[in-house]
Amino acid sequence: MSVRKCAVCGQFYPNNSNDILEMINHFNNILDNHLEDKKILELKTRAVIVPHAGYIYSGFTANIAFRLLVNSDIKRVVVIGPSHRVYLKGVSIAKYDYYETPFGSLKIDNKLTEELSNKFNLSFTPNAHSEHSTEVQMPFIAHYLHDCSVVEMVYGDESSEELSKVIEYLLSDIDTAVVISSDLSHYYEIQKAKRLDNICIEGIVGEDENILEDGCEACGKIGIKAMLMAAKQMGLKSKLLDYRTSADASGDESAVVGYLSAAFL
C-alpha cells in the first residue's frame, strides 16, 4: 500500500486534526453569523477555485468553497494545482493508494487515475507531489467529504486548452467535483495587489479567460483559465464567494498575497 505522505502539515496547516477542526468551526461561525447573503451557503456546485496559503491567511476563503461542495452528492474530488517546487512538462497525476491527512487517510481513486493517465497521456513525477497547492485542500476534503475518494493532479508547463479538456471530461460525470487551486498576486503593497487581483476577479466573474492576460498574476492562472474554458463549454456560471489579502490576517499592507474562492453553478 503506497501513501502520499503529508509534506507541509505543521507549516501551512496544523498537524493535529483538533486544531484544524477548531479553525474550521471558527470560519463557519463567521459565515453563519456575519454572511449577509445566507443563500450563498445553499448553492450547489461541483467546481470551485480555492487558494492554497497557510490556513491563518486563506483558510476562511477556501473553507466556504468546500462547505458548498457538501451540497452536491459527489463521490470523488479531483484537486488540480500548479507546481511550485519542480519543473514539469505537462501534468503529473499522483499514483498512490492513499493520501495522508491529519483526519486520516483519503482513498485515491486509482481507477480514475489510470483512466485519466491513458486518455490524456498524463505522467507520474513523484517528487512533484510534495506540493502545497494541492495538499492544503485535502484536510478540508477529509473533514467535509470524508467518504469521497480523491485524485491529485499537479501541472507545470501545460496549456490551459489541454487542461480544460481534462476538466470538462471530469465534470461530465455528476459524481465528480473539481477543485482548482490558485493564489493571486504576491508581495505587492495592498493597493497595487488589489488592482492586479481585480483583473483576475473580473475575468472569473465575467467568465472570460482572455481578461486574465491583462495583468492577472495568479500562480495558478493556467488552471483558472482552463476552468473558465471548460465552464464556457458546459454552460456553467461563476459566482465569487470571497476575496481578501494576507493583510486581513496579518495587518501588514506592505507586501500582501491575494486570495479568492469561486464556484461554478
Image: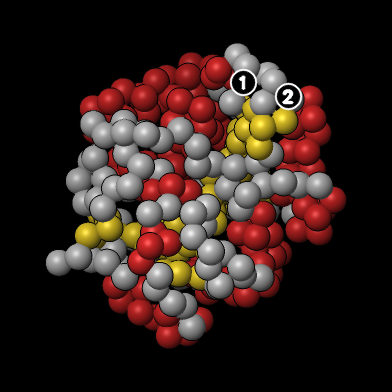
Image point (39%, 20%), residue name? 26
Return the x and y of residue 17 as percentages of the image width and height.
Answer: 24, 33
User: Do labels 2 and 1 touch, CB within 8 Å?
Assistant: yes
Q: Is residue 205 visible?
A: no
Q: Outermost residue, right direction?
A: 214
Image point (76%, 47%), residue name? 216
Position of 4 relative to 190 (above/below): below
Kindly identify the amino acid type of the residue bearing the numbered disc 2. Answer: Ile
Return the x and y of residue 65 as percentages of the image width and height.
Answer: 50, 41
Q: Which residue is mark 2?
A: 190
In the drawing, does residue 156 fall left or right of residue 189?
A: left
Q: Outermost residue, left direction?
A: 1
In the drawing, does residue 107 fall left or right of residue 262?
A: left
Q: Secondary structure at mark 1?
A: helix
Return the x and y of residue 192 as percentages of the image width and height.
Answer: 79, 30
Return the x and y of residue 217 as percentages of the image width and height.
Answer: 72, 46
Distance from the alpha carbon under mark 2 to that under mark 1: 8 Å
Please identify the quadrant where the N terminus is shown: bottom left
Position of 212 relative to 43 (above/below): below
Q: Is residue 87 visible?
A: yes
Counting other residues with Cα less than 10 Å from the Cα at mark 1, is it few (<14), some (14-19), or many (20 or more)? some
First along the sequence among labels 2 and 1: 2
In the drawing, does residue 264 fall left or right of residue 60?
A: right
Q: Which residue is mark 1?
A: 247
Counting other residues with Cα less than 10 Å from the Cα at mark 2, is it few (<14), some (14-19), or many (20 or more)? many
Kindly identify the amino acid type of the residue bearing the numbered disc 1. Answer: Ala
